Amino acid sequence: MSTLLLLVVFLPFLSALVLGLTYLFDTHKRVNEKFYTILGVAVPILVTILSFVIVLDLMSHSSTTVVTAVAFNWLSIDSFHIDLAFVADPLSAVMISFITFIGTLIHIYAAAYMSSDQGFGKFFSYFNLFLGSMLLLVLASNPIIMFIGWELVGLVSYLLIGFYNKEYENVTAANKAFIVNRVGDFGFIIGLGILFVAMGDNGFTFADIKENIYAIDNHTLTLVGIFLFIGAMGKSAQIPLYVWLPDAMAGPTPVSALIHAATMVTAGVYMVARFSFLYNEIPQVGEFIAIIGVSSALFAAIIASYQSDIKKILAYSTMSQLGYMFVAVGLGAYSAGIFHVFTHAFFKALLFMGAGAVIIALHHEQNIFKMGSLKKALPLVYITMFIATLAISGIPPFAGFFSKDAILNHAFMSEHYTIWVLGVITAFLTAFYMFRMLFIVFVADMKNNHIEHKALSKALTYPLIVLAIGATFAGFLGANEAYGGSDLFKSFISLNDINYSISHSTEYMLGFVNVLVSLLGVTLAYKYFRTSPQEPLPNKRVRTLIINKFYVDELYDRLFVQNLRSLSNFFNKTVDEKLIDGFINNVVHLNLYVASKFTSLQNGKIQHYSIYLLSGVSMMSLLLIYILEVR
């Protein structure tokens, strides 16, 4: 199993290297797209199979069983060693199973979506590099190797978001994603630094940290927990470091599906779950995480309700669902948080890929108000996206119901009633804006819409069917006794959950509330968008405020970007040019001035040189006489 674990991590990197070098040296474009497609898709398929083998092996043993693999010793300082090592325990095994599986479906989809693109080979090189980076992050046995994967994911996301780099808008979006993530990563590395010092000579693997966590004082743990979560804020797009996520839609749709469904944005949730033993010691930080999570969820849901770009609606939806996940892990329901990561991967990948199919069919149109009546033209896309919309809205028996229900129930039972209420309101808005999008795109009769659609290839549509099956049935893996299940997911993943006893009657009541508010959201969307779409909010100022995303980007631009630009100009024009360069230039000018004066002495006249010589001898003679007299 150790060999399989190494292959899972290194095969995507190897394929990315081969694809990249082939594309780089193929200057005459002689390599056929089939080569890039076969290698680019075959490796994720193989890695998926290997991941399933590892998961099945873990399932056949106890929940405490882990598979370890050491590639080589990466760093040694005296007795301290850091190995490039990987661990597959139930948590990481669950993560790699759906990362690779859904990643493979997105790769297949991307092969059709990116067909005939000039950068086809480069795209698949980046894609496989991204997959390998995420697997490195998830399987790392210690925080330092995790951080390397964490940074690689950020780097490759920059390359993918700005893939069409000839357009200024795309380059700006990629830069924004990269810079905002670096802000979060600065907090992450500070947290790791504090933890590293606190651990001393006790090692620095996750197992070492868990074993010695009780020897670290609460104040230090609090600082570590806060700084680590700052990293998660950036990577998982939570308030206030979320502004990069909507702009990341500048990348090709397969990139959006991969980043937003099962990989990059879920890294922050995974990191908190991986450090669950730490966060259980600092519940006050956990509450802070939950507050940020529910605030982000509600904030993003409000903005999504008035967006017109189909991909940006889904982007804010991702931010909102991530907020639910942070509510769960913040309140100690780590299994519920990872379960929502698991179910979300299916229906969110399906939504993005379905949106991409619509965009392709309508010749790259993304404004939902220029669509409409696509139900008959794209029946398969409509049915699968309808299933995904039901799942994300929390309608039973689809996957999102079970995971979202577990999170909201835990918030209620932990007596965080404000968080629970805000979570329920967000559930209402989620159903509203998702069905708003569905009705406008597929059902409403848009009389001004004359866009002709084109047929879609099987590679674009078949992955939607597979994901629709997952969005329908994946939730049953986490169904508890109240709904006729045995909570297989929670019992397998076996995290450090804080559990509360809840009666079946209470659970049914809370589930009824969750479903009721979702149905109210569906009803409201049906009322306003089923036939002739019109926004229900009458107040023009409020509508403008929401459509412009509460002007947060403009606020950040004024507070940070412009001030930093002014500061940079000050250092450039004043400090650098006038002080530093000015001092050096003045020294040079002084030397030139002095040199010009001395050059007048070098006039070539012998009589002048004789005077200089006599003057010098005279001065030296007088000096010598003075010295002798003093003695």
Image (cartoon, grey):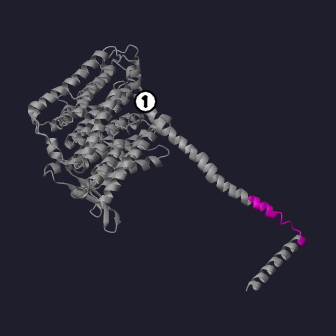
Q: Quadrant of residue 548?
A: top left
Position of the N terminus by quadrant: bottom left
Q: Does the magenta segment cover residue 534?
A: no
Please provide the residue range marked out in magenta: 592-607
| Above or below: residue 301 compared with residue 22 | above
Q: Residue 345's image quarter?
A: top left
Q: Position of residue 228 (x, y in %)?
A: 32, 48
The residue lying toward the viewer, choosing from 316 and 193, is 193
Query: Does the image show residue 32?
Result: no
User: What kind of residue is marked 1?
Assistant: Tyr
Q: Residue at image x 24%, y 51%?
A: 278
Residue 212 in view (yes/no): yes
Residue 549 image offset from top left, x and y in percent: 40, 29
- The residue wearing badge 1 is 551
> Which of the image's four quarters has the C terminus?
bottom right
The answer to which of 135 and 434 lies nearer the viewer is 434
- Left or right of residue 326: residue 120: right
Question: How many residues crowd around disc 1 within 10 Å: few (fewer than 14), some, or many (20 or more)?
Answer: few
Secondary structure, mark 1, is helix
- Main SS category, magenta section: helix
Residue 51 picture location, percent across and down: 24, 48
Q: Nearer the viewer, residue 198 or 68?
A: 198
Residue 298, image x and y in percent? Answer: 30, 31
Residue 596: say if magenta: yes
Location of residue 241 by image quarter: top left
- When the figure is inspected, residue 475 is found, relative to residue 284, above or below; the finding is above
Q: Is residue 200 above or below residue 405?
A: below
In the foreground, 111 or 431: 431
* Farthest front residue in view: 630
